[in-house]
Image (cartoon, rainbow, N blue to C red):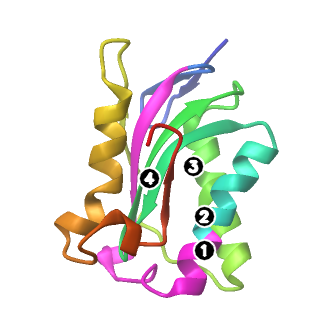
Amino acid sequence: MAYTDALRHRYSVAGQEYLITCCTQNKQQYLQDFHTARAVARALKQLEEEGLAEIKCWVVMPDHIHLLIQLVTDKGLARIIALLKVYASRNAGARIPWQKGYHERTLRSTDDRRDIARYIVMNPIRANLAKSVREYSHWDSVYL
């Protein structure tokens, strides 16, 4: 079953995979704090535990998150991302100021998931936050 977000002209389908980027308000480094970054990680786990999505790969950067997500439910991608933001704030014990909306790219069957996962987890290295992914705590991937 498909879900349409008429306000943003987005169409999402259970079973579909998406590459998502969510930024903090004004790209402020609200997620740089260890506790807050782990609150986002726990929120991702909650989405899985509630049967809403499978999180295939993710990284929490100081001012944004990237994730490779597969919808499990027909609630719609916009609703799942909104829940992620709410859960992250609850887990942090304070409101995390997020930008409205998110950027998404629908994955095609020809897209190499391992390449996408590498792109996601290499973000901290490209941003000079770590020299190796082993030095960075806030990521995970089923592909690597």
The label shown at residue 81 is 3
The residue most toward the right is 50
Circle 1 Cα neighbour tier, 10 Å, few/some/many (<14 / 14–19 / ≥20): some
Circle 3 Cα neighbour tier, 10 Å, few/some/many (<14 / 14–19 / ≥20): some
The label shown at residue 41 is 2
Circle 2 Cα neighbour tier, 10 Å, few/some/many (<14 / 14–19 / ≥20): many
Determine contact: label 3, label 2, CB under 8 Å: no
Q: What is the CA distance from the residue labelled 4 to the residue labelled 3? A: 8 Å
User: Residue 117, how many percent across, how many down?
Assistant: 37, 41
- Say which of 57 and 5 sits in front: 57
The label shown at residue 38 is 1
Could you tell whether 135 is left or right of 41 in the image? left
Q: What is the CA distance from the residue labelled 3 to the residue labelled 2? A: 13 Å
SS of the residue under disc 2: helix
Q: In which quarter of the image is the C terminus?
A: top left
Q: Label 4, on which residue?
A: 101
- Say which of 98 and 135 sits in front: 135
Q: Which segment did they paint magenta?
A: 16-39
Is residue 22 one of those drawn in magenta? yes
Point 47% across, 52% down: residue: 58
Instruction: Identify the amino acid type marked 3.
Output: Ile
Q: Nearer the viewer, mark 3 or mark 2?
A: 2
Determine contact: label 4, label 1, CB under 8 Å: no
Could you tell whether 28 is left or right of 36 in the image? left
Determine contact: label 1, label 2, CB under 8 Å: yes
Which comes before the other along the chain, label 4 or label 2?
2
